[in-house]
Image: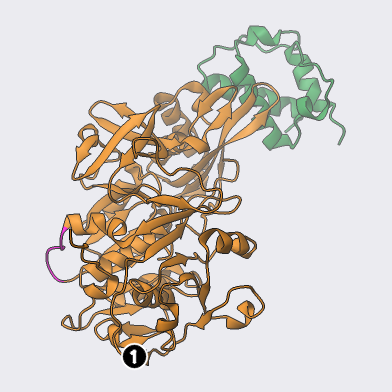
Chain colours: A green, B orange
Amino acid sequence: MSVRSKVIEAIQQIAKEQNVKLPALSDDLSLHETGFDSLAFAILVARLEDETGVDPFTISEDAAFPATVGDFVRAYENVPA
Amino acid sequence: MSPREIFALRDYLGAELKGRTLSDAHHVVSLTDILSRTVLGGRLRDLSGRAVLLRLSDQLRSGIAMIELDGIARRMLLCPPDLNPAHLDALIADAGIDAVVTDEPDRWAATGVSLVVTAQLPLQATPPPQTERATEWLMLTSGTSGVPKIVGHTLEALTGAIVAEGPAKGPAPVWATFYDIRRYGGLQIFLRAILSGGSMVLSDPHEALADHIARLNARGVSHISGTPSHWRKLLMSGSAAQFAPRYVRLSGEIADQAVLDGLKAAFPNSSVGHAYASTEAGVGFAVNDGLEGFPANYLGNRNGVEMKVVDGSLRIRSTRTAHAYIGRNAAALTDGDGFVDSGDIVELRGDRYYFVGRRGGIINIGGLKVHPEEIEAAINRHPDVRMSRAKSRRSPITGGIVVADVVLADGTDQARAKEIRDQILDQCRAQLASHKVPAVIRFVEALEVTPAGKLARTDA
């Protein structure tokens, strides 16, 4: 499974668990518009760390938290192997 | 005023009761004639009035040495098997130890302790000694880090709950415990066996659980106690089916409804009860209605045990509590009114109090305080879950999140793992505030249990 589809699948799973009605996930959708609160993002980052072995937001001290879904996915895609 | 009569353990060990034994995996010792036997090579006289460190590699010799020393030594300090040797010097100084009973005398040759007595089997014949004094019993707290605290008890305080309950109905019980008898929970069972006129079967840390259960059966164990973690391990092992005790007791950790129901199902003909006790607070109460928590009317003064809740924490005052912490820099054991603050946090729901966790075990989730035990109790309600441990994990988003490790019941189809995970999460969302719901659930084969029988909490 590609990194992108892992991220999207995790977002959809958490939305279901948290009863969040997701809009269509496009790269330029702002994360704010996903309806996720900080707890939902914390869950997302933790699960993706378990699945991919990386937490891009802790590795780099100056990494700004992404603004859009596309930025978020790229944060995982761009982690050096 | 005449001095009160001093009772010692030997007063409960007359020769009139036949067939009483104390046994471990290797030896069976008759309690019927124990008063004319010695494990101390006949050197009990030398230990009269001394402050004795009891440092033995097995429970059997420890138990017999306790019987001999009680009423003769000035004080005895019980060392549990997992005591870090690096802490011995500090404990010896704090307790004013001037004699040691050991099975490794060579190790003590070059230490400052002036009197070293070797405990040995087989027992030797000795004239029955006479009780001289009320011996002070010193026990160690089971905290995980640093030098354990020394807690001072008397035999009267240690046996207060046993005497209050009176003798058990029916034939003399054969007691067993998964605990070590050099810890408070295990010592309670050892004392129950002696005071009740019964026998006792000791645990062995090197024995497989199935062999242990076979031994309990062979010796006719009727009454048995352990922590919820001990019992969950037994329920997972598949060995419970061969065992049918009359009385099953839980203490030392929170007994949640899942483990109580699990034991009731595994042992349909047994009484299942949970007791609240700690090294410092002594035995508070027992609950025998099959439900977790305890009735709210237990607060106040009940059978000589006074309880109140201050800032959520249970406080206890009774003649069964320890009398002091012992040592050079020992803190006060009780508050100004004589109450021991247990640090166990309770919550009133309806007409019952429920234990929600330890004050010192709180984890911080995004600035909110969370008791891992409360989360575990919610997870454990799932019928396929045998035990669980909740802990915090750092999060770059919220600072911390809850994660849980879960052990599934024996024989659970691994293909159902995802379905079970979703059900657990649904259940947690229905019962817990959202920040307490585990963000991640990991299925594991086993969870670490400390030598004291409690779930290991490395992050607490």
Let me know if residue B174 appears in the view.
no
- Choose between B84 and B115: the one closer to the eye: B115
- Choose between B118 and B50: the one closer to the eye: B50
What residue do we see at 55% from left, 58% from top?
B94
What residue do we see at 26% from left, 71% from top?
B194
Q: Is residue B168 magenta?
A: yes
Q: Residue A22 is drawn in which quadrant?
A: top right
Q: Percent from the top left, x then y, of residue A17? A: 51, 23
Residue identified by numbered label 1:
B126
> As drawn, is B119 to the left or to the right of A44?
left
Q: In which quadrant of the rendered image does the C terminus of chain B lie?
A: top right
What residue do we see at 47% from left, 49% from top?
B413
Q: Residue B244 is drawn in which quadrant?
A: bottom left
Q: Is residue B33 magenta?
A: no
Let me know if residue B162 appears in the view.
yes
Q: Percent from the top left, x then y, of residue B447? A: 53, 51
Q: Residue furthest right?
A: A80
Q: Residue furthest bottom?
A: B125
> As drawn, is B384 to the left or to the right of B250?
right
Q: Say how many tags the image has.
A: 1
Q: In which quadrant of the rendered image does the N terminus of chain B lie?
A: bottom left
Q: Percent from the top left, x then y, of residue B191? A: 30, 66
Residue numbers of the magenta segment: B166-171
Q: Residue furthest front?
A: B1
Residue count near mark 1 (Cα–Cα under 10 Å), binned few <14, some 14–19, many ≥20: some
- In the image, residue B212 sits, relative to residue A47, either above or below, namely below
The type of residue carrying mark 1 is Thr
The residue tagged with tag 1: helix, strand or loop? loop
What residue do we see at 81% from left, 30% from top?
A59
Q: Residue furthest left?
A: B170
